[in-house]
């Protein structure tokens, strides 16, 4: 097992397949003309499989594939089917633009749950946020996956002045559609021009929803990142990921592997451990993984606290979100 100095067992690995994406969401990608990592520097399918197996052999029971947009990789299907052979729960985070091409692959790999990024239900605003005209395709694919009996979670990054007034529109969507909406507090990353006054907090979201509905808190798990709620008569649910105002680090069981093979023991960690170079040299990678986990900070990468109003982004050292992996 992989256990840190705070006795947290780590059994959940997020693997980024690429930092490439066919959308250009401003809070994730710093610039329109972002320079993507050359293919030779990305983990190759057999390298992803080898590293994933090493993690699984040391207690990992869940793997999530992320990006960028993971499905823009030409060998994405090969990677998915390779990892499907491991004794883990395999899941995927996607922007949904290419899901129609991967339904059969995901079913063959027994991927039953998907996280789909969608920050607005307004097509014009979607174009502004993503700088691409793909709203209809995304919505069509969300409903396609629901019709094919996938468990669909929709991730909504809530930003003051951008989409906070749409919260109840998303909740209304859950009434007749079995979609599970997850509202996410806006987080700081390199190049996303984050400021504390853009954060719409968990309590503010719940107050907004409670003006129209009577949400009921659902029982959670120590490893949950989201505070979950149901509304009587609704087929779906909603949840809030309160990273900034109410962190959930005490039960953290997550690790990240970037597309270029760097291990991050926290989304906000400044330090990274180069597993890919060690693997290519034939070195023993496990001690590197164990050392990374043992050095994990108590909360938020050791870079800030839940007093997010006091954060100065110029003092934070981290990658952009697209480079880390969603």
Image (tube, rainbow, N blue to C red):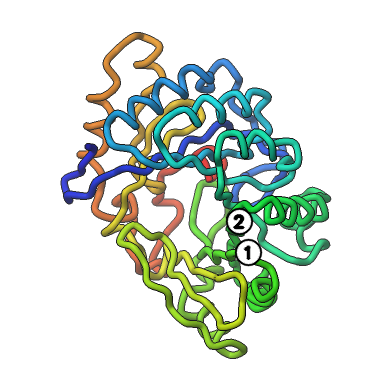
User: 62 or 128: nearer the eye?
Assistant: 62
Q: Is residue 163 above or below residue 272?
A: below
- Evaluate if marks 1 and 2 touch, with contact meaning CB atoms under 8 Å apart: yes
Q: Which residue position is annotated with label 2?
A: 152
Distance, label 1 to label 2, CA atoms, is 6 Å
Q: Which residue position is annotated with label 1?
A: 179
* Image quadrant where one finds the N terminus: top left
- Helix, strand or loop at mark 1: loop
Give the class, few, some or many, for how many residues have Cα within 10 Å of label 1's Cα (few <14, many ≥20).
many
Q: Is residue 45 above or below residue 93?
A: above
Is any part of residue 165 visible from this angle? Answer: no
| Residue ID at (25%, 38%) | 293
Q: Is residue 75 above or below residue 208?
A: above
Give the class, few, some or many, for how many residues have Cα within 10 Å of label 2's Cα (few <14, many ≥20).
many
Question: Residue 147's image quarter?
Answer: bottom right
Q: Is residue 224 left or right of residue 83?
A: left
Q: Is residue 286 left or right of residue 67?
A: left
């Amino acid at each position: 097992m992989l256990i840190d100095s705070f006795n947290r067992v780590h059994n959940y690995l997020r693997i980024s397949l690429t930092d490439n994406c066919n959308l250009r969401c401003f809070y994730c990608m710093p610039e329109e003309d972002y320079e993507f990592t050359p293919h030779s520097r990305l983990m190759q399918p057999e390298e992803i499989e080898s590293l994933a197996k090493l993690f699984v052999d040391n207690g990992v029971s869940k793997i999530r594939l992320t990006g960028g947009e993971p499905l823009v990789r030409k060998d994405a299907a090969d990677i998915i089917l390779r990892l499907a052979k491991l004794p883990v729960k395999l899941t995927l985070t996607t922007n949904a633009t290419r899901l129609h091409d991967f339904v059969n692959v995901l079913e063959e790999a027994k991927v039953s749950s998907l996280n789909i990024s969608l920050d607005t239900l307004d097509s014009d605003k979607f174009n502004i946020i993503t700088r691409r005209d793909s709203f209809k395709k995304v919505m069509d694919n969300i409903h396609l996956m629901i019709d094919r009996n996938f468990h669909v979670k929709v991730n909504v990054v809530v930003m003051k002045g951008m989409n906070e007034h749409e919260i109840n529109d998303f909740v209304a969507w859950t009434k007749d559609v079995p979609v599970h909406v997850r509202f996410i507090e806006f987080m700081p990353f390199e190049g996303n021009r984050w400021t504390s006054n853009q954060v719409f907090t968990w309590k503010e979201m719940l107050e907004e929803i409670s003006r129209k509905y009577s949400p009921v808190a659902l029982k959670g798990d120590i490893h949950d990142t989201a505070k979950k709620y149901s509304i009587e008569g609704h087929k779906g649910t909603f949840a809030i990921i309160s990273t900034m105002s109410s962190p959930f680090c005490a039960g953290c069981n997550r690790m990240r592997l970037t597309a270029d093979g760097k291990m991050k023991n926290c989304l906000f960690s400044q330090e990274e451990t180069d597993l890919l170079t060690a693997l290519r040299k034939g070195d023993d990678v496990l001690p590197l993984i164990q050392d990374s986990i043992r050095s994990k900070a108590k909360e938020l990468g050791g870079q800030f606290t839940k007093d997010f109003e006091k954060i100065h982004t110029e003092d934070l050292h981290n990658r952009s979100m697209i480079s880390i992996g969603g």
